[in-house]
Amino acid sequence: MAGVKKLTDRFLVALFRRGKADFLPPSYLKTEGDKVLATGETDKLLNMLADMVGKGILEEKNGEYKLLTDPFA
């Protein structure tokens, strides 16, 4: 399946960098991801967000997420 986009850490970081607020809700990330990712890819979103919080890349506050550090910069 050539050209199928997968949900990756790099994709999520890019969404945070272009977001309009410091803290973004998962619903925004899912909506934006669904526009360009393969069907079903955003189903992995919450697990990936939790993993990135555990790595110190994101901060979670009141169910919303903030990019703390860009590991790809």
Image (spheres, rainbow, N blue to C red):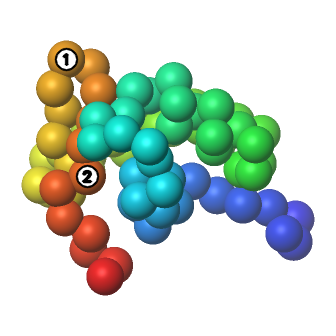
**Mark 1 or 2, nearer chain start:** 1
Question: Callout 1: 10 Å neighbours few (<14), some, many (20+)?
Answer: few
Residue count near mark 2 (Cα–Cα under 10 Å), binned few <14, some 14–19, many ≥20: many
Q: Does the rendering let one see residue 8? A: no
Q: Residue furthest bottom?
A: 73
User: Residue 39: image x %, image y %?
Assistant: 77, 39
Q: Quadrant of residue 5?
A: bottom right
Under tag 2, what secondary structure?
strand
Question: Is 10 above or below relative to 25?
Answer: below
> Is residue 7 something that shows in the picture?
yes
Residue at the disc numbered 2: 67
Along the line of sight, which residue is nearer the eye, 16 or 45?
Answer: 16
Tell me the residue at 71%/38% (across/down): 34
Q: Is residue 6 left or right of residue 51?
A: right
Quadrant of the image for the N terminus? bottom right
Three-letter amino acid code of the residue under disc 2: Leu
Q: Between residue 41 and residue 19, name the one nearer to us.
A: 19
Query: Which quadrant of the rendered structure holds the C terminus?
Result: bottom left
In this figure, what is the number of numbered marks? 2
